[in-house]
């Protein structure tokens, strides 16, 4: 009998090299989550439109597992969840996760397009990105401005 891996939301993923993501910089995780969540949104939103290439449902489910795997990886950066991953419940959209995501979203939105492009080019090339990083962490920003998150 074949050994079937249990598919736990936040743990299971279909990446060939998940270790890559486990060492990825915080901004890189935000970027991957942002891209994947946008792709999933538009796949579901436009799924029945005539111009949309219909992805197999299995691919969309795998993408959702990958997204939730990335979301749960944010624990490395101090994001808190009230429950552990489960095979029956999706990773929660905790206040902590939302605050973390909003911090990075607002930070990159505040960059002009030239600076944003320079940052991601430097990041992808493995160059020093410290000059592009925010002056504080997402938790420090939350503590200083709790109503903005």
Image: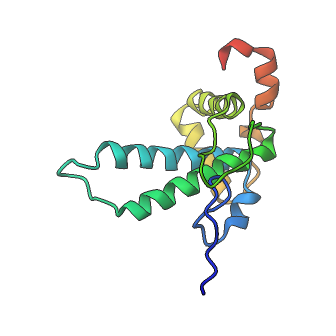
Q: Is residue 131 visible?
A: yes
Residue drawn at 59 percent across, 46 percent down: 90
Against 53, is 145 above or below? above
Against 56, is 112 above or below? above
Q: Residue furthest front?
A: 1
Residue drawn at 69 percent across, 12 percent down: 147
Q: Residue furthest bottom?
A: 1
Q: Residue furthest left?
A: 50
> Which of the image's four quarters has the N terminus?
bottom right
The answer to which quarter of the image holds residue 38 is top left
Residue drawn at 68 percent across, 27 percent down: 95
Q: Nearer the viewer, residue 2 or 29?
A: 2
**Relative image position of residue 51 (x, y in whole percent):** 20, 52
Q: Is residue 135 visible?
A: no
Count the marks: 0
**Relative image position of residue 74 (x, y in whole percent):** 73, 45
Q: Nearer the viewer, residue 62 or 50?
A: 62
**Relative image position of residue 107 (x, y in whole percent):** 64, 30
The answer to which quarter of the image holds residue 21 is bottom right
Colour mapping used in the image: rainbow
> Which of the image's four quarters has the C terminus?
top right
Q: Nearer the viewer, residue 85 or 32?
A: 85
Against 10, is 108 above or below? above
**Relative image position of residue 94 (x, y in whole percent):** 67, 32
């Amino acid at each position: 009998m074949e050994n079937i891996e249990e598919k736990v939301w936040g743990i299971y993923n279909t990446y060939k090299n998940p270790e890559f993501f486990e060492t990825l910089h915080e901004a890189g995780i935000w970027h991957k989550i942002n891209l994947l969540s946008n792709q999933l949104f538009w796949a579901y939103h436009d799924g029945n439109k005539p111009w949309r290439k219909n992805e197999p449902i299995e691919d969309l489910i795998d993408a959702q597992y990958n997204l939730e795997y990335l979301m749960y990886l944010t624990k490395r950066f101090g994001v808190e969840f009230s429950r552990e991953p489960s095979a029956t419940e999706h990773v929660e959209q905790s206040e902590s996760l939302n605050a973390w995501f909003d911090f990075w979203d607002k930070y990159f939105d505040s960059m002009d397009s030239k600076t944003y492009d320079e940052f991601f080019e430097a990041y992808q090339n493995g160059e020093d990105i410290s000059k592009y990083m925010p002056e504080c962490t997402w938790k420090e920003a939350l503590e200083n401005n709790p109503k903005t998150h």
